[in-house]
Amino acid sequence: MLFESLLPNFVGPLVLACLATPTCRGESLASVLKRVDDEDFAARVNGDRAAGPGTTLDIKEIVIGRCWDYQRVIGMKEGKPLSEVDCNGTAWPAFVNAFAYKSPCSTPEDAFSNFIKIMTVSLPVNGTLFWSGTKNLALMYSELSGGTMFSLELTFFGYTVNGLTWCGKHTGGIHGINYDSCPSFGDQSCQSPVSTVFWGSASMSFARQARGSISVLLDGSDPRGAFRNNSFFATMELPNLDTAMVDLVNIIVVHDLDGHIVDTCDNGTILILKDRIIQRGLQWKCKDDPKLAKLIQCTENPDNEKCNLTSGVNTLHGRSWNFIVLTLLASLWMIWTC
Ligand code: N1C
């Protein structure tokens, strides 16, 4: 499972290319996915990835500060910790002991389980928001949803370490932490990178807590496919939903403003996702480009022509039909009264 999540993201296009070939359409879905995983692995072994940046400077202060911030200011009304967590004496040691003085590439699968357990909060029923390839959009989506949708980054452990980089060093480093370089995501020379282990465990724990209806925000313009077989969503979240507690998966497919369409609710890898959801005994709904997503995209790209506030209104030489009809009516009235 973890191994699968380390594979690079070539699976989407392979699945799409395969779905377009008649010979491949005869294959069962399971064997297609197995085959693309093998091809994916071969591609990965031949790949070459550089190490990424080192641990975020002042990480201790950031983690402890965010931990208090969550408990005192930011935390969701429903997401309060079951009991107060001592950020300095309990949370930070649980986090740093998972990786300090250790190799960043052979992280045990349960390295962060203590930290995640300490930081677990009770979450509201309905509204868990998963995402894949749409992190920034998903974060704004949950912030703008007025507390009705929340992503992992709004939970206690997600909020505390979101956006940070960290890894350890056997010898040297400062207090066993490597501030020079950490394995990049999908580093082929790294068996189980520390950040992958963390986000894998965090995603699994988050998914297990979901109740009622859940949503997933996917990138329908991603050339790798919106639903990738090797993503955290596919490997850690979907399989770990408690089907006795979750009933519906709302799929939200968003396309970029330039109109690149790879997958929609009715085609491509979304069909694979629907099939997986049904196999799990759950129901699905799917929507392409809901208004809230477009609004968020437009706040980031206000000059895009799709964000022209009058673009939704029929126009003639730049004038709205309302204006033209009113002018015509006024002229007719004047002719009639003269
Ligand atoms: O592999 P992904 O997407 O499907 O992972 C996203 C999925 C979300 O639903 C989250 O709940 O998994 C969870 N998650 C995070 O919250 C998260 N924050 C930061 C998974 N990965 C996360 N990251 C980093 O994003 C992670 O270290 C890796 O680099 C990416 C994976 O994102 P993706 O491929 O877009």
Image (cartoon, rainbow, N blue to C red):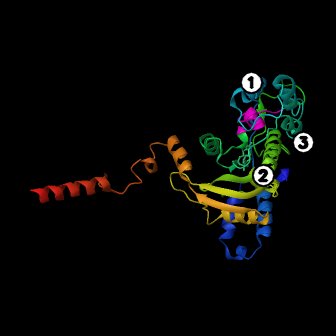
| Residue 229 appears in the figure | no
- Determine if the magenta segment contains residue 161: yes
User: Which span is picked out in magenta?
Assistant: 154-167
Relative depth, front residue between 2 and 162: 162
Q: Amino acid at mark 2?
A: Glu
Residue 66, horizontal then vertical, whole percent? 73, 28
Label 2 secondary element: helix
Q: Which mark is residue 237?
A: 2
Mark 3 or mark 2, whichever is nearer to me: 2
Q: Name the residue carrying label 1.
A: 65
Q: Amino acid at mark 1?
A: Gly
For marks 3 and 1, the one nearer the N-term is 1
Instruction: Give me the C-alpha separation between circle 3 and circle 2.
Output: 17 Å
Label 1 secondary element: helix
132 on left or right of 189: left
Instruction: Give me the C-alpha separation between circle 3 and circle 1.
Output: 25 Å
Q: Amino acid at mark 3?
A: Asp
- Quadrant containing ligand 1 reads top right
Q: Are the residues tagged 1 and 2 within 8 Å (C-beta)?
A: no
| Residue 32 appears in the figure | yes
For marks 3 and 2, the one nearer the N-term is 3
Residue 301, horizontal then vertical, whole percent? 50, 43
Residue 145, horizontal then vertical, whole percent? 61, 44
Label 3 secondary element: loop
Residue in the image at 78% along x and 52% along y: 237
Mark 3 residue crowding within 10 angstroms, few (<14) / some (14–19) / many (20+): few
Displayed quadrant of residue 198: top right
Residue in the image at 78% along x and 43% along y: 199
Q: Name the residue carrying label 3.
A: 110
For marks 1 and 2, the one nearer the N-term is 1
Residue in the image at 75% along x and 62% along y: 282
Q: Is mark 2 within 8 Å of ligand 1?
A: yes
